[in-house]
Amino acid sequence: MSDSLERNTKISQLKASLVKKLCEVLDKSSSKGWRKLGEIVGSDRRFKVSSDDMEMCSLKVLELEGSPSLMLLRLMGERGCTAGHLMDYLQTLGNQDALQCLKPPALQIVIQPQSVALICGHNLRLSCHAVGKSPLQYQWFKSKEEVPNSSSPDLVISPVHLKDAGFYICRVNTGDDFEFSQWVQVDVLNVAVSYGGQSYQSLDGRMKVVIQPQSQRLHVGENLQLECGAVGRPIPRYQWHRNGVPIANASNRKLTIPHAMQDQHGRYRCEISSRSSNNSERMWTNEVDVIIDDIYAIGRDSSDFFLNSIPEQLYATDKVALLIGNLSYQNHPQLKAPMVDVYDLTNLLRQLNFKVVSLLDLTESEMRNAVDEFLLLLHKGVYGLLYYAGHGYENYGNSFMVPVDAPNPYRSANCLCVQSILKLMQEKETGLNVFLLDMCRKRNIHDDSTPNIVLRVTANIVFGYATCQDAEAFELSSSGFTNGVFVKFLKKRLLDDEKITVVLDRVAEDMGQFDATKGKQALEIRSSLSERRALTDPILPGDSADLLHAHSRQWAKAHELPESMCLNFDCGAQIKLGFAAEFSNVLVIYTHIVKKPEDMSSCQAHVTDFTQDLDVDPKEMNRETPEETGIYLLSSCLPQHCLYTRLSSLQKLREELVFTVCLQGTFASMDDDHPVHWTKSVNIGKPLIARLDLHRAMRRNSCLQTCMMPHSPSHSPCHSPGPEHRLHPHHGSLQAQDSNRLSPQQRYLDICEHLQGTVGGCRDSYCDHLSQRRYDPPYDSPEGLSSSPGRLSIPIEATDDIDELQTVFINSLQPQL
């Protein structure tokens, strides 16, 4: 039996094509068909098939395309029958045609190409791999025409052009045997603005909207044309909607309505979906207004009405996001949810055309250098977003993010001040500054510094705090990897085409309905935003197009994956080496044996000899499943039948990444079974974020200088005035909690255990209730000592009753004595 079909494979796990072919043989046979097979299985006490079961199978012939054999196989599968048992039964039955269905063919395609949509100018790669007797020959076709120079398993077109769109298929032959792959479609999108040079490969096949429809105004009788587009693998599907109702026969990227009438005006948007064997995705484009004027009846007043009904479109000159998740702390409780939270937000923000830098587990110097690189991507009119999940605290209105190497106890000198980063962002004249802080905001009694950070009065600042002042943030107890409470609700709203403060308001309302955290965690929003700016706003470079291009190159520099490669060994074996990015500082390497000599009885390949900078555990390298090596989030996007290795903390890489690929094999002609070894050295340069050298010593830069230390020359007990802030408490009175934080990052064998922990400083765990255990961190207030509310240092709009609202809210945060 082939390696792809082991005897212990469950019947329910057999390929659908194999089961269909087997059922056709059994259904057609009268003497050696499904009835006789049922009698043989019925005599086996392990998988007893009763007469009632057989009668139920026979009734399937009354159904359209019903199959008694399929029903029988399903019953056998439900009772634990394996492929080995089935082969034994078919051997007893004497049905050789049925047995042949379970035997491997002389030539079999094991990796099928997938349909894909991508941007013009990027690289197209289609893969088709087969197993069979060597030599294997490949030939790609576009429709009925051969593709020139396409005789390898991978069809690469670099760069791809609009003319390359179409349908492709691959033919594989060995001797007289040949097989065709499945047909795949390639859709090439012509996008005027490059989105950071990011190719679809860096999205790990995830879908991303790159063309948004635009509002239109036209006269009766003119043609209405709307266009959208998404990249991804497999190719996305489209369904247009008007006023929330699906439009019949509108399932293409481009919607054309000839001779539009007035009753076809309204709000249009498109639902884009993608479904694969591993997962499914769905997203929406922006909703746009379509106004259709009656050319005969329109007058000045009605024209003014329609013109005023379309709000002025706001633009970003670019969109940049820095996402940091700290979980593997050296001197504090380890966390779990930041990894999932950063991963989910990364994919959502990419759909909104943000250039995203996503990083895990940064030290103080690495965090400061990452912020410096983030600031380099900002300029006038850019939308800047900073998300942080990890330990943290708040003193006198200033929020501090805690690096993974922070001492115990830590102080402001060991942390990054969020308001200092905001000050630097303001100097870039950004169009929107959004801070999403998923951390605790309890006071740190070990830090008595009072930073003096003077900020400009700008109407473009939004703070979304996962919890209220002097309160904690929580994450879910779960048998697997789950989001913290904040991101659990945020990710459902983040793509909404609404003003960012409206989006956060709705997230707060959703969190308020969550029973587990009522009275314990409430989203707080502080904003000075005066315009209707949304994360969905389009990008219009304007006069800064050259600057945008330069910044795009800078961003792309830190997100370039190494090209996949095939290694040819002297013995005749060929190994494919592939790469994927889980985060900006986490690289996945996978190896696959493409070809082995006929006289080689066994063949294995693995990677080894990595630099000590990366601290790779050999026990978690070259695993047969992604989960075994810690790849929990990206596993569904990786090719199968490979060995996987996960390299984290790429920011610590000081030199180019050089490692060894080892091949070992045994030959049937050799007397002993000792394997023969071959090695090849591979240099992939500095992949992903390693190119930015975040490991370097902290530079004398503005990020460090504006994080005011207790003994800084600019230290002052005075604070920026700021009692007039806008608060959104959505839960009423909150009592300060001193709860347990216990959430070590688990590996694959621990993933089924009930995990408890924190994100953002002191996230308590809960499932249906909050943990009753207690843990006193170094920054918790002693019992009976309330945290000082301090004064905010961010300039925000005032309302008539804001002072009273602030007083009531601050009082509600004091511990109940």
Image (spheres, helix red, strand yellow):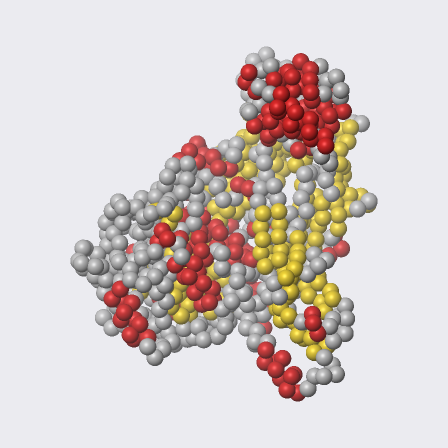
Residue at figure coordinates x 38%, y 47% from the top left = 476
| In this picture, residue 331 sits left or right of residue 489 | left
Location of residue 185 in the rendering, given as x and y in whole percent from the top left corner: 72, 48
Q: Nearer the viewer, residue 597 or 109?
A: 109
Is 211 rendered above or below residue 336? below
**Residue 39 appears anywhere in the view:** yes
Location of residue 520 in the rendering, given as x and y in whole percent from the top left corner: 31, 56
Location of residue 105 in the rendering, given as x and y in whole percent from the top left corner: 71, 26
Is 51 rendered above or below residue 500? above
| In this picture, residue 176 sits left or right of residue 309 | right
| In this picture, residue 135 sits left or right of residue 322 | right
To which quarter of the image does residue 129 belong?
top right
Residue at figure coordinates x 35%, y 65% from the top left = 729
Q: Nearer the viewer, residue 362 or 745?
A: 745
Residue at figure coordinates x 54%, y 65% from the top left = 497
Figure quadrant of the N terminus: top right
Residue placed furthest toward the bottom: 300
To which quarter of the image does residue 188 belong?
bottom right
To which quarter of the image does residue 322 belong?
bottom left
Is 456 rendered above or below residue 323? below
| In this picture, residue 513 sits left or right of residue 188 | left
Residue placed furthest toward the top: 671
**Residue 421 appears anywhere in the view:** no
Location of residue 303 in the rendering, given as x and y in whole percent from the top left corner: 65, 83
Disc tally is 0
Residue at figure coordinates x 76%, y 24% from the top left = 28
Figure quadrant of the C terminus: bottom left
